[in-house]
Amino acid sequence: GAVVSQHPSRVICKSGTSVKIECRSLDFQATTMFWYRQFPKKSLMLMATSNEGSKATYEQGVEKDKFLINHASLTLSTLTVTSAHPEDSSFYICSAHKPRGRGETQYFGPGTRLLVL
Amino acid sequence: AQKVTQAQTEISVVEKEDVTLDCVYETRDTTYYLFWYKQPPSGELVFLIRRNSFDEQNEISGRYSWNFQKSTSSFNFTITASQVVDSAVYFCALSEESGGFKTIFGAGTRLFVKA
């Protein structure tokens, strides 16, 4: 089956630094990827839709200058948390959209745990 | 606007009991997809099922079964003869064609299965 990877799986950084998270679709091309964040004991909240070759579409309330998304190729999207603060500590999950005959499906990455000290 | 409601925050059962997790959704689309995911403590989402809006057939997979009722906008999930390994958070999710297939998740139901 399709596989989506995320790197790193876990990252600890100091407040004020920037952190880049990669999301790769390993065996299919994904024109669209999605980024979610999940706080402890909460649900997954969609942050943005990443489109290959164009600007990302952000959900209401998500700061686009804070969470930079780049979808440079059909297999890679990156999320950069700029000037991270402790409140950005969360579990970040990406998914890659794979269109198919009638309908679609998404494959989720394993997630990245970010801890900002 | 799409919305998914999982009214049960936590459910606790004893092993071998049957348990049903409820999911109610809202959408204006005629083409949409419903999902159930399991999230164990490790955090990685485990895909359980995908159902499109044109297929109301119920499905059974081992101890798992799903009941899709468009008339009540519900997509309930039943685990038969629950086991301790079923303990996890379960999410119901909705994806609309008009929304570019972005997936919206319900709040999740935390299931505890005691031995």
Image (tube, rainbow, N blue to C red):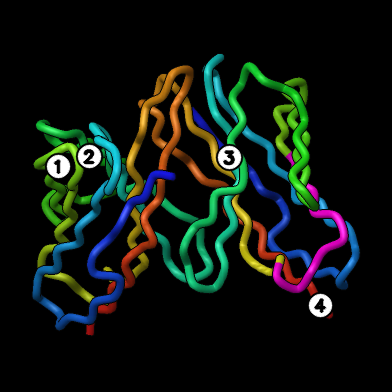
Q: Looking at the picture, how far across and down is residue A62, in whole percent?
A: 26, 49
Mark 3 packing: few (<14 Cα in 10 Å), some, or many (20+)?
many
Both marks 1 and 3 on one chain:
no
Q: Is residue A60 visible?
A: no
| Looking at the image, residue B108 lies above or below residue A103 | below
Mark 4 vs 3: CB contact within 8 A: no
Residue for point 16% across, 34% down: A52
Residue at image mark 3: B35
| Looking at the image, residue B43 lies above or below residue A105 | below
Both marks 1 and 2 on one chain:
yes
Residue A70 falls left or right of residue A28: left
Residue at image mark 2: A50
Q: Secondary structure at mark 1?
A: strand
Residue for point 20% across, 74% down: A85
Residue B114 falls left or right of residue A30: right
CA gap, disc 2 and disc 4: 41 Å
CA gap, disc 2 and disc 3: 21 Å
Residue for point 51% across, 31% down: B2
CA gap, disc 1 and disc 2: 6 Å
Q: Secondary structure at mark 3?
A: strand
Q: Amino acid at mark 2?
A: Ser
For mark 4, name the chain. Answer: B
* Residue B10 image-quadrant placement: bottom right
Mark 1 vs 2: CB contact within 8 A: yes
Instruction: Provide the residue span drawn in magenta.
Output: B76-85
